[in-house]
Amino acid sequence: MIEHLINLVIAVLDKVGYAGVFFGMALESACIPIPSEAILPFGGFLSYTGRLDIFWTIMLGTVGGTLGSLAAYYLGKLGGRPLVEKYADRIRLNRAHLEKTDYYFDKYGEKIVFYSRLLPIIRTFISLPAGIAKMDVNKFVIYTFAGSLIWSVLLGYAGYALGQNWVLTRPWFHVADIIVAGAIVAFAAYKLSGRLRKVNS
């Protein structure tokens, strides 16, 4: 499934170039799991061949990612908060949980957003909780742009530097995906076990 999606992304980018980089990164950052690990390295490869320019590939990837993140942020801010509050009991949340989320984003939102942009999987979805917590939008945009720029430089330049061998980046990012997904599952299991201990005690 993932390989088919990656191949589709590559085929589209091969035809539309800059527009594919921009819209692909925008969609990925708007919580649609299109892998930037394919978009940016292949964009870097196209820059290596001379079909694109590496500077504009990186910048359009960054701007696209920022705008997509902003769309997801407002989705969380305008629509997500009322839904979470309405169905909090059903998803085992209470007002204390929501207040804690607000507190962390109010105090550490810049760091949370910035470092999340450098993590596979998490970077795709972090905008929604930032919007739900009503993080200051100006700070959100600044730190999203900064984190997205670093991500775009790393992946885009990797594809540019490797040239014909740009596909060598893919196994590394698969490993990173597995590590991050494993960490998320482990954290969820830890929290669930804590709740079960409380219920049984």
Image (tube, grey):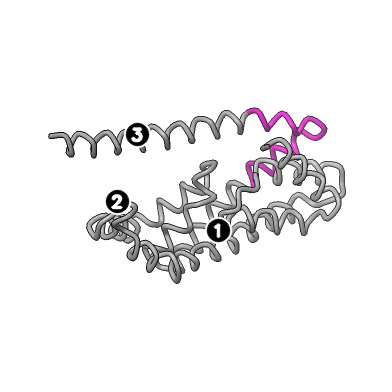
Task: Name the element at disc 2.
Answer: loop
Q: Label 3 vs label 2: CA separation?
A: 15 Å
Q: Residue at 62%, 29% (x, y): give it.
A: 172
Magenta stretch: residue 166 in it?
Answer: yes
Amino acid type at image mark 2: Arg
Magenta stretch: residue 112 in it?
Answer: no
**Which residue is outermost to the left?**
201
Among the 4 quarters of the image, the one containing residue 82:
bottom left
Task: Name the element at disc 3.
Answer: helix
On screen, 175 above or below 23?
A: above
Residue bounds of the magenta highlight: 152-171
Q: Residue at 58%, 48% (x, y): give it.
A: 150
Which residue is denoted by mark 3 in the rendering?
Answer: 189
* Number of dots carrying numbers: 3
Amino acid type at image mark 3: Ala
Amino acid type at image mark 1: Phe
Disc sitting over residue 145 in the figure: 1
Among the 4 quarters of the image, the one containing residue 105:
bottom left
Task: Name the element at disc 1.
Answer: helix
Residue 47 rendering spot, x and y as whole percentages: 81, 46
**Label 1 vs label 2, nearer the camera:** 2
Q: In this view, does 29 lie to the left or right of 40?
A: left
Which residue is denoted by mark 2 in the rendering?
Answer: 92
Q: Is residue 165 left or right of residue 67?
A: right
On screen, 109 above or below 82?
A: above
Q: Label 1 vs label 2: CA separation?
A: 33 Å
**Label 1 vs label 3, nearer the camera:** 3
Categorize mark 1 by other alpha carbons within 10 Å: few (<14), some (14-19), many (20+): many
Precedes in sequence: disc 1 or disc 2: 2
